[in-house]
């Protein structure tokens, strides 16, 4: 599925469906692909990221999900980007090599966040090792300092990075530092893909964000700003009743959305539709 087309438009950060007992549920991925394409008009996906609970999954589970998305998305999705970031460099490299082997459109990686890189050079060195395992497909940096604690500015990171990582294609920017993001857009928008991933920032009329969570792009931003406590568990609950696809519970230490949240979310959805 590797594609030479430039990534553009909405990209769904996919949920990982799970059974009631917490096992990954591969059986609904095909239905999920069709929902994104036919109901939401979304043809790009970002698999095993934060919304997909990627770092709560085993390496084998992440591989299985990657394979299923690539297989079920064939001839339907334009881009299947697999997040391969991990605390362990060998694990990240293994996942990157696997993603390339199964035909993913690209890979993405975060900064390790237990033993953290303290400057641009060490971060680039880590990312370069990961990207080198998939030399034939694009590499994206997943910038999410609220969770990693790594606050190296992306505008600084992008300066000269192509010389270090030839496959570097862009950034998934999940931070509220809009000055940093604005500088990236100003100086690098022609060279790199810049995906903005903070969906709590409501899209303005006539505008489209480049990243969508789960697949319910029209309603999710409005819901999240009117109902408190919106996270992965809540996203799974809302996607379940909006799409009809059983997304199941999140994996511990995350807890399932409360009944109160689900009732309020359903009421808000009904008001938006009306």
Image: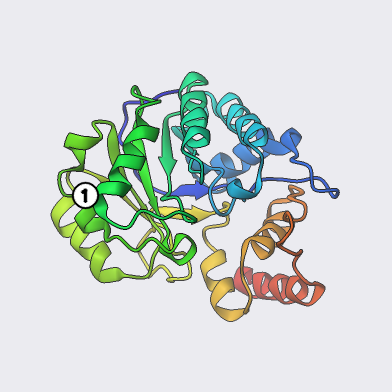
In front: 1, or 61?
A: 61
**Horizontal and vertical percent position of residue 37:** 54, 40
Say above or below: 112 vs 178. Answer: above
Q: How is the image coloured?
A: rainbow
x then y, percent, for residue 269: 66, 69
User: Residue 182 in the image: x percent, y percent?
Assistant: 22, 64
Q: In this view of the protein, which residue sits in the foreground, 105 or 74?
A: 105
Total labels drawn: 1
Quadrant placement of the C terminus: bottom right
Image-based side of 128 in relation to 76, left or right: left
Q: Is residue 176 left or right of residue 47?
A: left
Q: Residues within 10 Å of mark 1 (few under 14, many from 20)?
A: many
Residue at position x 43%, y 43% in the image:
109
Please name whichever residue, 112 or 134, is drawn nearer the observer in this view of the structure.
112
State the residue at coordinates (73%, 47%).
Answer: 245
The residue indicated by pointer 1 is 158
Residue 152 position within the rendered picture, expressed as x and y whole percent measured from the top left: 30, 60
Query: Residue drawn 44% across and 71% down?
Result: 202
- For this orientation, the residue located farthest to the right is 21
Q: Which residue lies furthest to the front in this view?
A: 115
Query: Taking the image as drawn, is residue 148 in sight?
Result: yes
Decide which of 117, 137 is in the foreground and name it: 117
Name the element at disc 1: helix
Extreme residue toward the top, this view = 101
Residue 7 in view, yes or no: no
Residue 59, quarter of the rendered image: top right
**Compared to 148, does 93 lie above or below?**
above
Q: Is residue 189 left or right of residue 46?
A: left
């Amino acid at each position: 599925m590797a594609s030479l087309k430039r990534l553009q438009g909405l990209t769904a950060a996919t949920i990982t469906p799970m059974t009631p007992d917490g096992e990954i549920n591969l059986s609904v991925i095909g239905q999920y692909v069709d929902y994104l394409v036919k109901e939401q008009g979304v043809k790009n996906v970002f698999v095993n990221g934060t919304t997909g609970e990627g770092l709560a999954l085993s390496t084998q589970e992440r591989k299985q999900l990657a394979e299923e998305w690539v297989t079920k998305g064939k001839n339907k999705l334009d881009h299947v980007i697999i997040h391969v970031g991990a605390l362990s460099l060998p694990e990240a490299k293994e996942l990157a090599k696997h993603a390339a082997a199964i035909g993913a459109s690209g890979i993405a990686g975060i900064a390790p966040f237990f033993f953290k890189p303290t400057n641009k050079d060490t971060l680039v060195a880590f990312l370069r090792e990961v990207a080198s395992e998939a030399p034939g497909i694009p590499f994206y940096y997943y910038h999410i300092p609220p969770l990693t604690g790594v606050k190296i500015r992306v505008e600084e990171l992008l300066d000269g990075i192509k010389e270090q990582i030839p496959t570097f294609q862009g950034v998934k920017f999940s931070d509220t530092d809009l000055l940093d993001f604005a500088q990236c857009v100003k100086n690098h928008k022609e060279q790199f893909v810049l995906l903005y991933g903070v969906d709590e920032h409501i899209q303005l009329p006539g505008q489209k964000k480049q990243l969508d969570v789960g697949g319910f792009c029209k309603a999710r931003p409005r819901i999240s700003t009117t109902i408190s406590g919106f996270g992965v568990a809540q996203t799974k609950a809302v996607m379940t009743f909006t799409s009809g696809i059983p997304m199941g519970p999140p994996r511990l230490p995350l807890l399932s959305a409360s009944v109160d949240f689900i009732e309020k979310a359903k009421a808000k959805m009904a008001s938006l539709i009306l």
